Amino acid sequence: QVQLVESGGGLVQTGGSLTLSCAASGRTFSSYGMAWFRQCPGQEREFVATISRSGGQTTYAASVKDRFTISRDNTKNILYLQMNSLKPEDAAVYYCAAGLYSTDYKKYSAWGQGTQVTVSS
């Protein structure tokens, strides 16, 4: 069991950077694969990045590879998404999720409330 709260979203110019955080309250944080998804109004949830329980494996969507970095600190129960070289198409509500190490949102059992990222051009 884990509860998730995202933070760090905001407004940034094209080419800028943001780091999102996802704080987990459950003591079983390290038992879960974690992921970031994003969603625009009227659109399906889109995979961004996922990380294994130990942090040793990561997978990225092609659209963010080489620009975003997912990481986790299991001693602090925090998941991160470092976002560099942001583009207008990166604007969305970003959600963290706990479940399996997977690109499929249906594999995740716990979700945060989301944090808004806006990119100006």
Image (cartoon, grey):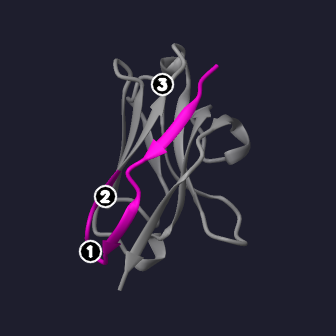
Q: Circle 2 is placed at which residue position?
A: 18
3 over 51 or under it: above or below: above
| Disc 1 from disc 2: Cα separation | 10 Å
In the shown orientation, is residue 103 left or right of residue 85? Answer: right
Q: Are marks 1 and 3 in contact (CB under 8 Å)?
A: no
Spot occupied by residue 81 in the image (x, y as percentages of width and height):
38, 48
What residue do we see at 39% from left, 29% from top?
Answer: 55
Q: Name the residue type under label 3.
A: Arg
| Disc 1 from disc 3: Cα separation | 31 Å
* Quarter placement of the N terminus: top right
What residue do we see at 66% from left, 59% from top?
Answer: 45
Look at the image and say whether residue 7 sits in the magenta stretch.
yes
Q: Name the residue type under label 1.
A: Gly
Q: Which mark is residue 33?
A: none
Circle 2 — which element? strand
Circle 3 — which element? loop
In the shown orientation, is residue 46 left or right of residue 76? Answer: right
Look at the image and say whether residue 98 sits in the magenta stretch.
no
In the shown orientation, is residue 50 left or right of residue 106? Answer: left
In the shown orientation, is residue 9 left or right of residue 32? Answer: left
What residue do we see at 55% from left, 34% from top?
Answer: 4
Circle 1 — which element? loop
What residue do we see at 39% from left, 74% from top?
Answer: 119
Earlier in the chain: of badge 1 and badge 3, it is 1
Q: Circle 1 is placed at which residue position?
A: 15
Question: 97 or 5, which lies in front?
Answer: 5
Question: 22 or 105, which lies in front?
Answer: 22
Q: Name the residue type under label 2.
A: Leu
107 over 40 or under it: above or below: above
Q: Which residues are magenta?
A: 1-19
Q: Which mark is residue 53?
A: 3
